[in-house]
């Protein structure tokens, strides 16, 4: 039911099993979230691969530091049954600024620090630490 929550669960499960990479069905919104995770250093990289039946997959390379996963926690905040929105002035800090929150704003998908800097609020997609 929730494709974004499914992607986060695949990342969590892949890291629990110490997998090098995982496959996620492709969408532009998922690619935007993975762009942010890559830019912030939570994943190594991701690639778009085409399948036989005219569909696309995202191959996500997970990142580890000394054998432990870089992502300690990735949690969906705004769910399909209950959307959570926030103003620019009240965007929550994750672990006192050590983690990050990913927001969907009218200007696109961005981190909580970028949203505060641009004074834009939006839907809080997830928090990562």
Image (spheres, helix red, strand yellow):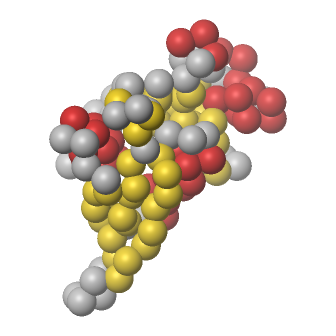
The image shows a total of numbered marks equal to 0
Query: Does 41 sit above or below residue 129?
Result: below
Percent across and percent down for residue 52 are: 24, 89
Visible in this render: residue 27?
Answer: yes
In this orientation, which residue lies closer to the viewer: 64 or 107? 64
Percent across and percent down for residue 86 are: 58, 24
In this orientation, which residue lies closer to the viewer: 76 or 88? 76
Visible in this render: residue 3?
Answer: no
In this orientation, which residue lies closer to the viewer: 111 or 82? 111
Task: Pick out the residue farthest to the right.
Answer: 118
Q: Residue 90 appears in which quarter of the rendering?
A: top right
**Residue found 22% across the figure and 35% down from its top:** 16
Percent across and percent down for residue 44 are: 49, 51
**Residue found 39% across the figure and 57% down from its top:** 60
**Left or right, residue 100 beside residue 121:** left
**Residue found 62% across the figure and 47% down from its top:** 39
**Left or right, residue 28 beside residue 61:** right
**Residue found 56% across the figure and 27% down from its top:** 100
Task: Pick out the residue farthest to the top.
Answer: 96
Query: Does 30 sit above or below residue 59?
Result: above
Query: Does 29 sit above or below residue 94?
Result: below
Percent across and percent down for residue 32 are: 54, 55
């Amino acid at each position: 039911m929730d494709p974004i929550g499914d992607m986060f669960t695949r990342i969590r499960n892949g890291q629990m099993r110490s997998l090098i990479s995982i496959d996620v069905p492709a969408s532009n919104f998922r690619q935007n979230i993975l762009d942010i995770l890559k830019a912030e250093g939570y994943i190594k990289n991701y690639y778009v691969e085409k399948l036989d039946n005219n569909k696309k997959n995202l191959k996500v390379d997970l990142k580890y530091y000394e054998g432990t996963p870089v992502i300690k926690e990735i949690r969906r905040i705004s769910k399909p049954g209950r959307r959570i929105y926030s103003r620019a002035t009240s965007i929550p800090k994750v672990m006192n600024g050590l983690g990050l929150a990913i927001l969907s704003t009218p200007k696109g998908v961005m981190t909580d620090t970028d949203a505060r800097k641009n004074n834009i609020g939006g839907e809080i997609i997830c928090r990562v630490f």
